[in-house]
Image (cartoon, helix red, strand yellow):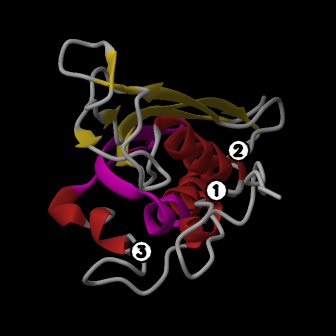
């Protein structure tokens, strides 16, 4: 007879990034580089849900410019618009893991969660891991996972976060002109 363990729950995270596509790219890249929580017939699945609405805005785009393609307070593109983004995502974890003992799954999941917590800010955790006669409820009590986050270098507490290399920097000369992209027209 096979042994089974089950992983089910949610993790709410706060993702760095200047635009929604950049935030999603960073989150997806981090998830792709986490250790696998294994089972002989399939590993733990992670489903990503962006929270509804927005919780951040900027008057400038990711290049640092005010443009005419940002959204105004009426939802229309406007010269004086804003860039609205949602930092928070809900990760749903789900796994029916065959040929795994409870202690093995718990250890693999904790390694996965701790690695996630160092790279992406964790707001809340509610995950249950259960085996034949054992069960563990993992929560973010006393902000234990929130406090694992390696703040980015630009923050007050910052050292350097693994995700910083995923945020692209535009190359500029001393006058602030872009050095990449479409070249400027030269008059002769």
- Secondary element under disc 3, as helix, strand or loop, is loop
Q: In x, y percent, where is residue 188?
A: 83, 58
- Residues at discs 3 and 1 in contact (Cβ within 8 Å): no
Front residue of 16/168: it is 168
Front residue of 68/44: it is 68
Q: How many labels, in total?
A: 3
Name the residue: 45% across, 25% down: 49
Q: Which residue is mark 2?
A: 100
- Residues at discs 1 and 2 in contact (Cβ within 8 Å): yes
Labels 3 and 1: the sequence-earlier one: 1
Disc sitting over residue 152 in the figure: 3
- Secondary element under disc 1, as helix, strand or loop, is helix
In the image, is residue 65 part of the stretch drawn in magenta?
A: no
* Residue 186 seen in the figure: yes
Asked if residue 89 is positioned above or below residue 138 in the image, the reply reads: above
Disc sitting over residue 104 in the figure: 1
Asked if residue 164 is positioned above or below residue 91 in the image, the reply reads: below
Front disc: 3 or 1: 3
Name the residue: 41% across, 50% down: 65
Asked if residue 69 is positioned above or below residue 159 in the image, the reply reads: above
Front residue of 100/71: it is 71
Labels 2 and 3: the sequence-earlier one: 2
Front residue of 33/128: it is 33
Name the residue: 26% across, 40% down: 57
- Secondary element under disc 2, as helix, strand or loop, is loop
């Amino acid at each position: 007879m096979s042994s089974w363990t089950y992983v089910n729950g949610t993790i709410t995270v706060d993702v760095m990034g200047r635009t929604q596509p950049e935030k999603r790219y960073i989150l997806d890249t981090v998830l792709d580089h986490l250790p696998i929580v294994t089972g002989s017939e399939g590993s733990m699945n992670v489903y990503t849900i962006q929270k509804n609405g927005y919780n951040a805005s900027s008057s400038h785009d990711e290049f640092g410019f005010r443009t005419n393609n940002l959204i105004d307070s009426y939802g229309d593109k406007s010269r004086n618009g804003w860039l609205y983004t949602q930092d928070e995502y809900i990760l749903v974890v789900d796994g029916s893991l065959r040929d795994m003992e409870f202690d093995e799954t718990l250890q693999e999941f904790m390694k996965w969660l701790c690695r996630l917590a160092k790279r992406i800010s964790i707001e809340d955790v509610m995950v249950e891991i259960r085996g034949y006669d054992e069960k563990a409820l993992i929560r973010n009590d006393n902000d234990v996972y929130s406090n694992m986050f390696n703040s980015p270098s630009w923050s007050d507490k910052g050292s350097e976060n693994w995700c910083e290399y995923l945020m692209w920097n535009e190359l500029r000369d001393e006058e602030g002109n872009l050095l990449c992209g479409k070249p400027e027209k030269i008059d002769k």
